[in-house]
Structures are given as structure tokens and as C-alpha cells.
Image (cartoon, rainbow, N blue to C red):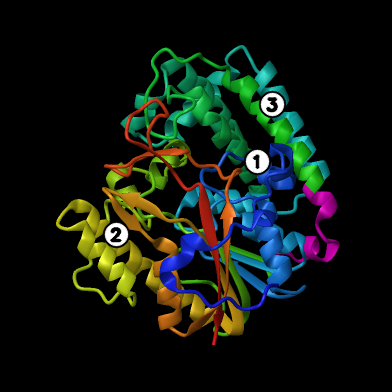
Amino acid sequence: MNNTIILERTTFSEIPIDYTWSFSDKTIKDTSYITHGYYTYPAKFIPQLAARLILENSKEGDIVIDPFMGSGTTVVESIVNKRIGIGTDINEIAYLLAKVKTTPIKISELLQEFSNLDFDLQNRLNGQYDYFLKMAEQILPKNERIDYWFLPQQKEKLSIIFARILEIRNNDIKDFFLIAFAQILKSCSIWLQKSVKPTRDPHKKNYDPFTLFLNQSKKMLKKYFEFDKVLNQNIKNNIDKFRIVKCSDSRNLPCKQDTATLIVTSPPYVTSYEYADLHQLPSLWFGYLSELSEFRKKFIGSAYKEDGGEIDLKSSIADKIVSQLGENKKVKEVKKYFADMLESFLEMKRVLKKGGRACIVIGNTEFNGVKILNAEVFQEQFENIGFRTYNIIHREIPSKMLPSTRDTKTGQFVKTTDKNLKLAYPTEYILIMEKL
């Protein structure tokens, strides 16, 4: 680890890029190894980044926490590297995915259940599908947005798969195949395939859900075999002691005070696209989403958050950004975002032991000509609640799963053919803050 860096908060962009943290030599195969390749999750950081932070800032047996766990990258790398991994996320899809990616399953039972599924989906004809369709009618949430995104013939086949999965008695295996199901939903919908925004494509090719589901399940089985080989046997046998994942708020971590050694996380961005929108297809099928506007309100950085009134953001930089934004909808969103993040940092302080470190992976962005200096604000907030700056790393993000262009006026992600483009998140920072 480098020596502690002392920096003026206004010079972050002048920090030289450390290309050893870019991992530009890693292929998609490398970054989707073991269970990391189960599901296409937006804006996740690569496992090599999480692993390096874990190995350089903790030792075996330590508690490592990700309060914004997303797809569970930090938790997976924690248990693979013989740490105790704890993660929370307010998004039910993230929670389900992280749980599945970190749950050991008997390979023989997993293979047998896949064989049963394969046989049923390919051979149960002569009215047997009617049974599953009737089951689906009973269990599938009555939500018009399902019909908005799925053509009748696709919805029917997906309903058959969904009902058949829910018949699986072993909950861990059932969840495994639910993730395979979730992964194919975008391809089976009329959501524009290459778009991260909720855009319909009425001329989209119809893919066969049965074929996609069985192929995705096979891919996940191969990934699981890799995971099973690298996971320590003691951790497999005692997974509930080494892995805790919860569908809960980042401001309520399932960890005792002063016990964790390390936080490794990548929080959402205040002016990023709506994370809720990107998860709405599986959320619709699994019954997590009724009204989209209500669903969106749960997420930090959402434009649908209510104004928090007068809040001490513990950052003069944040106050300046808010004042520069003037009177518009965005100023409420930014203020609430920084206030929510401050509460999350206070919870990190509670669970970290003295000398414990919080590694925050975050980039800066811009809205309507105003620079949103997330990294600088976060550093100032941490220092004002009892941390010191241990290190700041400036890295390129060639592998991060984010759209690459943003409209400079609206701050929204757009197509590369649009005007007023600005490269979004070409680099980001890793703040390593140490609890005093």
C-alpha cells in the first residue's frame, strides 16, 4: 500500500492515473469468472478491483462489508478470499442475485433438477402445459406493465417456465433457476436490446424462451462448477457464518459496532440513469414492483426522492454544488443524495473498528454545466465525521458496465449519435478512508 496521501480537495483531477487499477488487460471471460457471470447487472465493478482492495486492506477471517452490494461482487470475492462477506441492497433483485451467487449447492442435486426442468420443458406436451399456465395465472402478479413489455406468445412460454421453477422444493436451487429466468427476460421482451433506457422495439426479433432459459441455465451450471472448486470447504460447510446478505437499507447494516475491518463499495450516482428502471422486468415477474413511481423512491440518487428540507451535509463543497444548481428539480435530488450518503457513511463508521478502512469507488459527473464532485464531497464528509484520508486512487474504467455518453445539458445518458455529448465516467476515484 502507498503511503498516506495528503491532497487539496480541489485537485482530484490532477491526481495521476494509476493504470495498475484499470485492469484493461482483463477480458469479459476474466471479469465474469465463477458466479460473476450469472447475470448482466448494470454499473457493477469488476471482481479484480474488489479482490485487490480486499487483499490489500484486510486479512483472512476479517469482516468485509458492501452496503450497496448490487450484484454481490464484493461478497463473492470476500468469501472466495476467506473473509466474512456482508452485503446489503435495497433492491430485491440485487439481494436475490447476491444470495444465489454466494450459496453453495450440492452439485448432484443441482444437476438432477436441471435434468428434470429440461425434460419437462421439452417433452411435456398433450395438455401438460395447461397445468403450468393455470398455475402461472394464480401466481403471476396482475400488472399491466408485464403486457406492456411482453408479447402474448412470449408471455405464455415465460409463464410456463416461471410456474415450473416455482415447483422446485429446494429453495436454493429454485432461486438459482429464478436468476437464469431473470437473465432471459430482456431478450424475450420488446425492450430495445442494446438500450439501458426503457425503450420499446415493436420489431424486435422473437427469441424462444425455452431455448434461452435452458442455455442460460447451462452457462450458470458451468460457472457454478468453477465457484465450487475455488470456495474453501470450511466456508461451504458454514456459509451462514461467512456470508450475510440482506435486502435492506445501507443505513442499517447487519453487523455489530466496531467489528468490521473493511468496506468495499461502489455507491449509485446522483445524476445516473434510474437503477430502478433497469431492474423492472424481473421485478415485475417476481412481484417486487407494483407502481413504478413507488418502486423508484427506494433508491438513493432517485429523482423521485422527497425534499429533505434543511440538511447539514457536512461538506462545504456539497453546499456550493447545491447553490450553483439554483432552483430546479435537480437541486432537491442532489441535496437528498448527499444527505443519504452521509447517513450511510455514519453507519459505516459505526460498524468499522478503529483503523478500519472504507474503500469507496465513485466518479464525478456534471449537470447543466455544474460539476457534481461526488468524490470530493465524500472525502470531506468522511473527514468531518471521524476519518482520515489514507489514499486516493485515480483509475480508468474501461471495463465498467456503463453507457459512455451523457447530454451536457440534461445530465441524462443518450445515444452516441445525439448532440451535446460528453464522455461519461472516463475515470473514477477510489477513496480509502481510515477510521480514527
Res 376 quadrant in image: bottom left
Residue pointed to by mark 2: 334
Q: Is residue 173 visible?
A: no
- Tell me, yes or no, whether the highlighted magenta stretch contains residue 238: yes
Residues shaded magenta: 227-239
Residue pointed to by mark 1: 38
> Of label 2 and label 3, which has the lower sequence position?
3
Position of residue 280 relative to residue 158, above or below, is below
Q: Nearer the viewer, residue 171 or 294?
A: 294
Q: Residue at x 65, y 59 (%)?
A: 50
Q: Secondary structure at mark 2?
A: helix
3D distance between C-alphas at marks 1 and 3: 12 Å
Callout 1 amino acid: Tyr
Residue 215's tag is 3
Callout 3 amino acid: Asn
Callout 2 amino acid: Val
